[in-house]
Image (cartoon, rainbow, N blue to C red):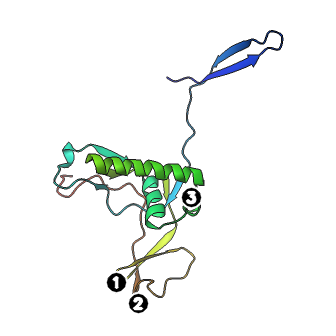
């Protein structure tokens, strides 16, 4: 059990001596993470090196909020401040999430480990997802905003609504597993 340790140095005027006061208090407990807003679950649950059986691989867990940070900064190209606002966190917290995600992805890629997408204190954004029949481009729109009339990629007008992304924990069973 960790205990917090507080050290105070007091300077006395008369003899210019230092006094050390040590207080032992309650166990040090970190503050809980603020709930982060994500668009939805990734389409896949894991990535692994080709030709390697899953059972022999070390895994690196990439939390869902870290995946969202990668999506917003690296894929969407948003500035950290904009991305942080979308996730409902501070810019500094977003920067730390992104740094952690980059380190984990680099570790998995360079050392042949499996990336597993799971965990984190997250909630789903309230958005609707549409897809163009003509080119397959996905378009998202927040609730309360009108349905897109044209595809931004091909200007086609054949747009359908897709099932909303979920934030439920993905199934841990694989095809072929016995129930």
Q: Is residue 39 visible to the viewer in this orientation of the structure? A: no
> How many labels sit on residues?
3
* Residue at numbered disc 2: 156
Q: Residues within 10 Å of mark 3 (few under 14, many from 20)?
A: many
Q: Residues within 10 Å of mark 1 (few under 14, many from 20)?
A: some
Checking the image for residue 135, the label placed there is: 1
Q: Is residue 176 visible to the viewer in this orientation of the structure? A: yes
Please tell me in which quadrant of the rendered image residue 43 appears. Answer: bottom left
Pointers 2 and 1 in contact (C-beta within 8 Å): yes
N-term mark: 2 or 3: 3
Q: Going by the image, does 143 lie left or right of 53?
A: right
The residue under the point 56% across, 49% down is 34
Task: Kindly report the distance in space between the C-alpha atoms of the residues bearing marks 1 and 3.
Answer: 31 Å
Nearest the eye: 118 or 48: 48
Please tell me in which quadrant of the rendered image residue 169 appears. Answer: bottom left
Task: Kindly report the distance in space between the C-alpha atoms of the residues bearing marks 2 and 3.
Answer: 32 Å
Checking the image for residue 148, the label placed there is: none
Nearest the eye: 121 or 8: 8
Q: Residues within 10 Å of mark 2 (few under 14, many from 20)?
A: some
The residue under the point 16% across, 54% down is 51
Task: Kindly report the distance in space between the C-alpha atoms of the residues bearing marks 2 and 1.
Answer: 8 Å
* Residue at numbered disc 3: 84
């Amino acid at each position: 059990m960790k205990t917090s340790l507080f050290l105070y140095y007091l300077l006395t005027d008369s003899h210019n001596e230092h006094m050390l006061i040590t207080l032992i208090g309650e166990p040090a407990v970190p503050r809980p993470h603020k709930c982060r807003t994500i668009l939805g679950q990734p389409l896949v649950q894991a990535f692994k090196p080709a030709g390697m059986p899953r059972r022999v691989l070390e895994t690196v867990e990439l939390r869902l909020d870290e995946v969202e940070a990668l999506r917003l900064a690296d894929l969407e190209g948003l500035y950290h401040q904009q991305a942080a606002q979308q996730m409902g966190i501070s810019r500094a917290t977003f920067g730390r999430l992104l740094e952690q995600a980059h380190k984990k992805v680099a570790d998995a890629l360079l050392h042949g480990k499996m990336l597993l997408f799971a965990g984190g204190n997250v909630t789903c954004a309230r958005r609707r997802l549409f897809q163009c029949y003509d080119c397959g481009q996905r378009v998202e729109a927040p609730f309360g905003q009108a349905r897109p009339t044209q595809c931004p990629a091909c200007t086609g007008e054949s747009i359908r609504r897709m099932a909303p992304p979920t934030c439920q924990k993905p199934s841990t069973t694989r095809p072929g597993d016995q129930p």
